[in-house]
Amino acid sequence: MINNAIPLRIAGIGYSVPETVVTNEDLTKLYDTSDEWIYTRTGIKERRLVSGNEDALSLGVDAAKKALDKSGLKPDDIELIIVASSAPPQLYPAIGCRIQTALNIPNNIPAFDITAACSGLIYALSIARGYIASGMYKNILLVATDNNSRLLDWSDRSCSILFGDGAGAMVVTASDDGVDDIISLDIRADGSIGDIIQLNLQGKNCPLVEQREESNQYIQMNGKEVYRFVARVLPEYVENLIANANMKAEDIDYLIPHQANLRIIQAVQERLGYANEKVVTNIEKYGNTSAASIPLALVEGVEKGKVKLGATAILTGFGAGMTWGGCIVRLREGIC
Ligand code: COA
């Protein structure tokens, strides 16, 4: 971090999920699968999916409202909006611009979207941290939202079982008590293996020129390769994140990981030597909600009494890119 950096306070967090529940049993109407197959390999029992006109924007607006409400800030106070979305309803206008209008946030502030897939919230937080540290902006709204279900091939049983829809939001602000809620933050990418999860935009070349090869327009994933990569990299990465912060695993109260696969979460848990009480999982109910999954797990963990505020937590995520990241945070009372 830069010298004289202004510390960051996490002021409010919220989430939003669609009402509609689709269980593993429901998926047997689409293809040959079973609750047992899905649950034993992933830890997922059901997921929430957008229906009708719901989408990542409507979920994002709802999550942002809740985070703003908890933060005690008003729409007028927000100076920048950053949205992490990799499965958005449209590429532009940016969801950030749409949220600005929907929440009556002043129409002369900057708003933009970033793409870091399931690591999106941690990437967005790292950008916000830089802006706050430098004094450029004081109050920033972060939203992580994806409508994966609209971009899945619902005949692909190895990929479509995994994902759900949802949104998370965080309001961060310059800390006025000198305490930085970000104890440590790190983000990474390795584009050399980028094709193990991808989503191509459809499109055709100008009719006057040679056409390109048709590409699949849905989320495509080599599940085995993703699993192998993450299981190899993530546990050691999280261990190093803690050591680089001059901390020990036992100094931190909770592990709140991206909810992609229960077996991967357990591999990180084992490496840290954490008891189940310290590890927050809700993949069983929501599947993989991409960028939204960390704030969703965090706030739901608080609502259920599993996570006590006034504690510290490791947030860690990974996703297409491949991207990954981790953050050790202080969770103050009243943030959700
Ligand atoms: N139900 C029943 N059988 C299924 C199935 C389903 N939903 N999906 C795949 N299968 C079958 C395959 O057809 C294959 O059958 P075959 O051996 O007769 O060819 C067999 O099960 C094994 O398929 P495979 O894709 O190799 O399964 P897997 O053990 O790798 O498990 C995942 C698939 C997706 C659950 C697993 O790879 C995974 O979780 N990967 C990580 C994905 C991830 O985290 N992505 C998000 C990143 S942010």
Image (tube, rainbow, N blue to C red):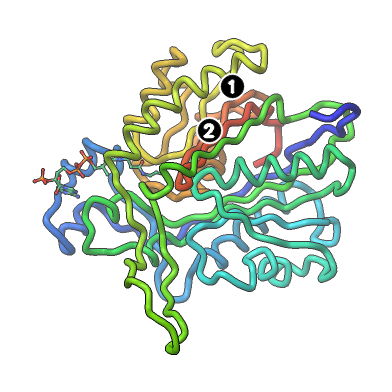
- Point out residue 269 in the picture as x, y percentages from the top left corner: 42, 21
Instruction: For the N terminus, give its image quadrant.
Output: top right
Q: How crowded is mark 1: few (under 14 residues within 10 Å), some or many (20 or more)?
A: many
Q: Give the image quarter of residue 30.
A: bottom left
- At mark 1, the secondary structure is helix
- Point out residue 175 in the picture as x, y percentages from the top left corner: 84, 35
Residue 102 located left or right of residue 177: left
- Point out residue 279 in the picture as x, y percentages from the top left corner: 46, 26
Residue 139 located left or right of residue 157: right
- Point out residue 74 in the picture as x, y percentages from the top left corner: 81, 57
Closer to the camera in the image, 285 or 210: 210
Q: What residue sits right under mark 1 in the picture?
A: 241
Q: Which mark is residue 90?
A: none
* Residue at image coords 51%, 31%: 256
Q: Which of marks 1 and 2 is nearer the N terminus?
A: 1
Residue 334 located left or right of residue 154: right
Q: How crowded is mark 2: few (under 14 residues within 10 Å), some or many (20 or more)?
A: many
Q: What residue sits right under mark 2 in the picture?
A: 316
Q: Distance between the residues labelled 1 and 2?
A: 10 Å
Q: On the rendering, which quadrant does ligand 1 occupy?
A: top left
Closer to the camera in the image, 22 or 201: 201
Amino acid bearing label 1: Leu
Q: Does the residue labelled 2 lie within 8 Å of ligand 1?
A: no
Q: Nearer the viewer, mark 1 or mark 2?
A: 1
* Residue at image coords 61%, 12%: 251
Q: Residue furthest bottom?
A: 208
Amino acid bearing label 2: Thr
- At mark 2, the secondary structure is strand
Q: Is residue 199 above or below residue 308?
A: below
* Residue at image coords 40%, 70%: 51
Q: Give the image quarter of residue 63.
A: bottom right
Q: In this view, does 130 lie above or below 270?
A: below
